[in-house]
Image (cartoon, rainbow, N blue to C red):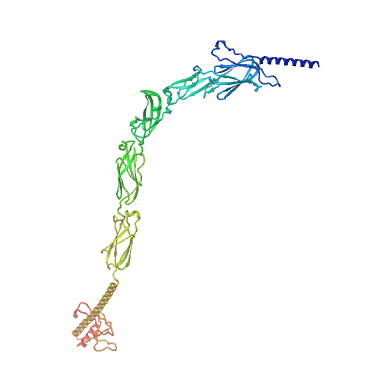
Amino acid sequence: MAGLGGLRVLLLLAGLVAMANCQENSTAIPDNTPADPENSSDQPKPTAVPGNPTDQSTTGPPPPLCNYSGKADKTGFLFTFEKVTEGNYSIKLTELSTGESNEETVSLSGTNATHRVQNLKPSTDYTVHISPSKYQKLTCGGNLKLKTNGINPNEIEELPTDSYQDICYETEWNISTAVFDASSKKYKFCITPKNTDLCTNFRTLSYPSLNLTKWIGFEYLNPDNITLEVPDKLPAEINWCNQNDLKCEGLGINFTCHGPDTRKYKLDELEPYTKYTCSGVLYNQTIAINKTVTKEVNITCGDIKLVVKDTTAENVSIHFKWEASSQQCPKFSHHENLSYICSCSAAKAGPSKERSCKVPDLDPFTKYNCEIQPRFNDKPIGKPTENRDLLTKPGVPDAVTIKTHTQLENNAFRVECSDLEKSKWRGPKVLYRATITPGSQNEENKSCSFKFQDLSYSTTYTVSIVAFNGEYYGKAGQVKIITSSHTVWVLLRVLVLLSFSVLTMVAVLHLIGWWRTRGNKTATEECIGLNSASDAPPARERLGQGASDEQQHTVDMDLDRAPRGPTVVQRGGQKAVGSAQLNIIDSVTPVSQVTHGPETQRRLGGSQQSNL
């Protein structure tokens, strides 16, 4: 029990001491005495804040005690804590204009402890709130309002540059758009001048207490910001379009160009439709600046305009005449390397440097799609003339080939030929014309088939067929045809021939009969003569039954052989009832010269005696 009583006494004493300290802090007066008497005229006076915590909570351990003051210092504030309970404290600064805030935690202990907050924005009002870290709801004497110092030129350092693209600065102040570098604990910001800022005092920084400017010379001229334009005309030019935006005088660009070869060209030497790479060196007055620009140049003179003045179509060719002009390049139409190619479908003519051409080797009466293409250095340029459908004049059609000829009657026949293809007519019309000679019969037809009739019989005709296209006749196809004789005349001729043949045969037979009769008579007379000479009676043979006395008996005798048999000849054309053959010697031989055989002599002798 004695122990518990002693403990109670100690706790009571501690409570009394704490109450006494609180009364002392609540009666403390803020210290407005400058921290540095020598600089009191330049430095802002610190603002003291009573240190009693404002929390009236009676539960838990007692809150820490804090008493501080603050003032503007360099690029921020300096806070001085006269009495503070050891521990961690939160310092929160909030901009009054924007409401932006930054907060940091510091460890404080003892009397007259200080802490600097730097890298704030210049000439900016802040609200300061300091509280123990464990008791965020407690405020050390309430919020404090402070304003940072203004910036001065000595606090900004310009950084060196080699590109002269940007102007960069470094400072401990938190400049807007600046980026904090943790390694150097400074803010860095850059400003890029425009071409319009050249040759001017460019304002790089503006604050209420500071206006920072810099002269922007030619070294800050950025070639990428130069706008160049190449007019499509000759002589060639390269214009600096945004040059007037600059405040500089006497500034220009001198160009040198390189073409397909290795030769260097001036702008007035450039040819159209040729690619060049032109490099320009900037100069001020006559002094070159170490800045260059590059521009590709290809002058096309717009599209050269061709106006066709005359078109003459022949049957196998088309002739053109035209005029060429260019508004952008007035002298280009007379350039020595300018030429033209004329084409009509697949047929071409040229290249021609004259303003005329003739497309040959065309087909007559054929529609062609024609155009004229300008060329420069043997390469097509611009656009050709508008396509024109032109028709060549008619030409000579192809020759006709006769296919068949057929006889319809003795004096009529049909002639047919192969029809020509459409492209072979070479003219507006399709007409076959047939002529037959001798005679004046002419026929025309759209198909190659002709009938000729009522012709003369047994006559040779020549048929000629030509193709006519309305302008020209083609080469004729010919055929010779012979008509037959008339049927009546043929029959008459046959009858005549038959009659003549019969008469001829009759005459021949009559002559043969007469000749035989005459021959027999002569032989009989010779035989009688012989019998008279030898006084021998005529030889007789027994005739068949019915023979009359008027019949003359003749014996076919052979001087060398015995007679074959009797032959009976009737006078007055009567038919013989027997037959005998007498071989008559064509040349008469004297009887005295004939040598007879014994039998013959006997017969001859008998015959002569009968005659006597």
Q: Say which residue appears at 67% left-offset and 14% top-offset.
A: 24
Quadrant, the N terminus: top right
Question: Which quadrant of the figure has residue 489?
Answer: bottom left
Instruction: Tell me residue 88's x, y (percent).
Output: 64, 19
User: Looking at this view, is 166 or 595 the one in front?
Assistant: 166
Quadrant, the C terminus: bottom left
Give the tally of numbered discs: 0
Compared to residue 351, the image places residue 568 above or below, namely below
Q: Is residue 578 left or right of residue 143?
A: left
Q: Say which residue appears at 36% left-offset and 41% top-offset.
A: 383
Instruction: Tell me residue 128's x, y (percent).
Output: 59, 20
Q: Is residue 58 left or right of residue 414?
A: right
Q: Is residue 79 visible?
A: no
User: Looking at this view, is 437 or 513 the one in front?
Assistant: 437
User: Looking at this view, is 291 or 274 the one in front?
Assistant: 291
Compared to residue 565, the image places residue 236 above or below, namely above
Compared to residue 263, the image places residue 480 above or below, namely below
Query: Residue extending furthest right?
Result: 1
Question: Which quadrant of the figure has residue 490?
Answer: bottom left
Q: Is residue 330 visible?
A: yes
Question: Which quadrant of the figure has residue 218?
Answer: top left
User: Looking at this view, is 356 or 305 the one in front?
Assistant: 305
Compared to residue 569, the image places residue 267 above or below, namely above
Q: Is residue 397 left or right of residue 295?
A: left
Instruction: Tell me residue 35's x, y (percent).
Output: 58, 12
Instruction: Tell me residue 139's x, y (percent).
Output: 64, 20
